[in-house]
Amino acid sequence: MLEVIDLFKESDTVDELGVGSIRDAIAEGLFPGTSVLHTRLRYVLFIPWLLQLAAHKATTDEMSAEFRKLEYRLIGSLLAGGESIGVIGNRARNNLKRMPSDIYWAALGSWGVRLSGSSAEGYFRRQLDHRRLARRTAPTDDSEARELLPGTGLDPHLPGPPQDLLKVADFTVTAEEELYLSDVIAAATEGSMLAWLICHQPGSMTEYVWELDNLWEAPARLAELADHARRFHTAIHGAALVYNLRLARKSGRDEAVAQYEDGLLRWREEMQRTATMESWSRTGWWTSIERLKPVRPITRQFVDRWLNLVEQDADLARSGVAADLVATRERQIKGVRARLVNQAALDRWSGGSGLGRLDFRWTVAARHLQDLYTARAAS
């Protein structure tokens, strides 16, 4: 897991001021099923293929052991295929602890590739039950009896694996796989930005979803949610800068103090240039968030107070109210471990924390979409 995070982590996952519930609500509304630990889309096929291969063993324990071996073999196969970036376990190899199946298991369910099973072990138990029932049903003359057999737990329309999967593999999605993945993901996430972008390819990929050149064609609800994401992305970044400025001042790091004071000046210019607070319906904003995922009142209170300060267009680098607000928020989240009250924690501060700009998993979603677009163009 540490290796995956080191290679592909999103810096916005450092939630110093406790806005992760809002970030995740927007991310799930735009790109359901995605995770910051995802690397490449074809893992969504690799995992069920390996499950099917392992299910030929006689017992669930043997199936589970075989599945783990196959996941390790997949690492070598991808490396042999010329892949390195995006290969989960490319350095840890057989010492890898957090397997690709752990990382993508929820996505398999959210996107309709996995139809049942809370874990790989549950899937294997289902396979054993299915096998036993099939043997009992085989001798009967009643054709309808076999139709009543429970499913295997995977989508029956799943494309078959390539013959050399465990020898040489890569992340290139084939034309058949693209059709399958596009259909199943779009159907499972209907009404989301992910589903809409699967069917409406933009002219080019951008750093943030709200910068897409075809966003104006999207349904009004999705365009509005993307705009809420843009405004929150910009406005909340100032709170992270104020927090780090307070840490820099408290630890006596003059160079860092100058850095964050300059950062707040540039952030204020960005706020004005992008008209972040202009005509922003805060009521509509909170209605959208609460529809997606309830937010704790204390979190909403902090965000509202911060946005009220931002609307005043004050010099927040010199604002005692802003400094106290972020200090209070850190204590609410961390208690005695808060850096602004705990000298030992402050001494461990690296000089910057929680500064990653929120992209609401767009980096991950864009990578998945690009895999589909590339396959589509090549077909």
Image: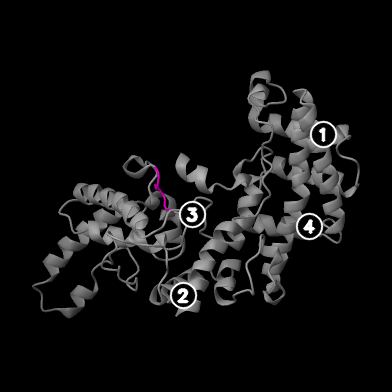
Q: Residue at x 62, y 67 (%)?
A: 205
- Indicate the quadrant where residue 134 lies: bottom left
The answer to which of 147 and 95 lies nearer the viewer is: 95
The residue that mark 3 highlights is: 38
Mark 3 or mark 2, which has the lower sequence index? 3
Residue 137 vertical position relative to residue 12 in the rendered view, above or below: below
Identify the residue position indicated by label 2 in the image: 183
**Residue 258, numbered circle:** 1
Q: Kindly identify the amino acid type of the residue bearing the numbered disc 4.
A: Thr
Question: In the shown orientation, is residue 223 left or right of residue 4?
Answer: right
Type of the residue with mark 2 = Asp
Whether the magenta-drawn stretch holds residue 302 is answered as no
Q: Residues within 10 Å of mark 4 (few under 14, many from 20)?
A: few
Could you tell me which residue is drawn at 68 percent across and 21 percent down?
A: 342
**What is the C-alpha distance between the residues marked 2 and 4?**
35 Å
Which label's residue is closer to the chain start, 3 or 1?
3
CA–CA distance in space, label 3 to label 2? 20 Å
